[in-house]
Amino acid sequence: HLGRPEIFALVRTAKEMGLKKVVVTHAEFPSQSLTGDEQRALADAGAVIEHCFTTTYTAKAPWELAFDNIRKTGVSRTLVSTDL
């Protein structure tokens, strides 16, 4: 798990290195709390955005926030996981 500053640095560096696969995990988790616009920007830079079931299930973020962020980022650039 990475903090907010590291997420942006890692995705930027991965793109510069020509890496094809980067996953940003726990997009809505409180310590990352990436906005929809930030998630879209990271996806535009080549990242796949992971939305974890446990974050919403345990009420750390509202379901509708995750749904809105998925819509904003696009389902083709989204990964949904249980994190179990």
Image (spheres, rainbow, N blue to C red):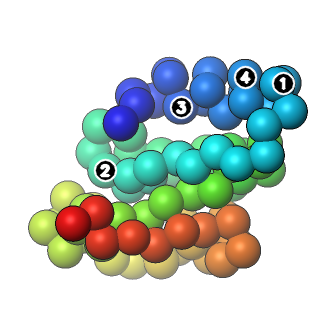
| Identity, as a three-letter code, of the amino acid under mark 4 | Thr
Residue under label 3:
7
| Identity, as a three-letter code, of the amino acid under mark 3 | Ile
Residue under label 4:
13
On screen, residue 32 above or below 72: above
Gap in angstroms between the C-alphas marked 2 and 3? 13 Å
In this rendering, position of residue 48 left or right of residue 51: right
Residue under label 2:
29
| Identity, as a three-letter code, of the amino acid under mark 2 | Phe
Q: Quadrant of residue 71?
A: bottom right
Rate crowding at label 3 as few (under 14), some (14 to 19) or many (20 or more) other CA atoms within 10 Å: some
In this rendering, position of residue 52 left or right of residue 79: left
Quadrant the C terminus occupies: bottom left
Name the spot of residue 18 as percent of width and height, x first: 86, 33
Upstream in sequence: badge 4 or badge 2: 4
Q: Which mark is residue 16?
A: 1
Residue toward you, 29 or 50: 50
On screen, residue 21 above or below 73: above
Rate crowding at label 4 as few (under 14), some (14 to 19) or many (20 or more) other CA atoms within 10 Å: few
